[in-house]
Image (cartoon, grey):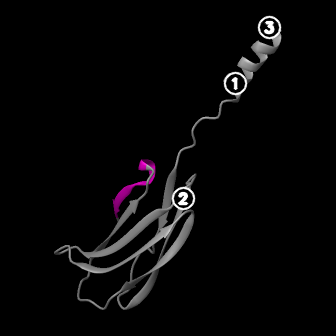
C-alpha cells in the first residue's frame, strides 16, 4: 500500500509540467519603400487566446502617423502596411499587442 502511495507522489513530483513561456515574433522588412505595400507578420508561441495587433508607421520628426493597420489573430498572421509617398526620410514602426494574457501584451518601437 505504501509503495503505491509513494509511487503516486513520486510521479506527481517528477511528472509536473512547468508552465510554458509565451511570446511572439514580429517580422518586418529591414527598409520600407515609399509608395509601396509592405508585409508585417507576427506569430505567437504557446498562445491560447486571440491577440489584437496594431502597427503604426510614425514620422520621426513629429510623431505624425503616416500609416497604420491592425489585425486580431490567435496563432499567426500577416498584414499589409501601406507606406505612403512622403518627404519623410526616417520613420519608425510602433507595434501594440493587446491580449487577455499579460505575457503577450506589449508596446514595441522598431
Bin the neighbour count of mark 1 within 10 Å (Cα to Cα): few under 14, some 14-19, many 20 and up.
few
Q: CA distance from mark 2 to mark 1?
A: 29 Å
Which residue is more in the foreground, 88 or 4? 4
> Which residue corresponds to mark 2?
44
Residue 102 locus on image (x, y percent): 41, 49
Find the magenta span and give its range. 102-109
Secondary structure type for disc 1: helix
Residue 66 shown left or right of residue 28 in the figure? left
Bin the neighbour count of mark 3 within 10 Å (Cα to Cα): few under 14, some 14-19, many 20 and up.
few
> Which residue corresponds to mark 1?
12
Instruction: Mark 2 vs mark 1: give the one in front.
Output: 1
Which residue is more in the foreground, 78 or 90? 78
| Residue name at image x 45 percent, y 82 percent | 38
Q: Is residue 71 above or below residue 102?
A: below
Q: Which of pointers 2 and 1 lies earlier in the amino acid sequence? A: 1
**Residue 2: image tag:** 3
> Does the magenta segment cover residue 106?
yes
Amino acid at each position: 500500500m505504501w509503495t503505491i502511495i509513494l509511487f503516486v507522489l513520486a510521479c506527481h513530483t517528477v511528472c509536473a509540467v512547468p508552465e510554458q513561456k509565451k511570446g511572439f515574433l514580429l517580422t518586418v522588412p529591414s527598409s520600407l519603400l515609399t509608395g509601396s505595400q509592405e508585409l508585417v507578420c507576427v506569430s505567437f508561441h504557446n498562445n491560447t487566446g486571440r491577440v489584437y495587433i496594431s502597427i503604426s508607421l510614425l514620422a520621426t520628426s513629429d510623431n505624425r502617423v503616416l500609416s497604420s493597420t491592425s489585425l486580431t489573430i490567435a496563432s499567426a498572421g500577416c498584414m499589409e502596411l501601406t507606406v505612403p509617398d512622403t518627404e519623410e526620410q526616417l520613420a519608425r514602426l510602433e507595434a501594440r499587442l493587446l491580449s487577455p494574457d499579460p505575457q503577450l501584451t506589449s508596446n514595441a518601437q522598431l
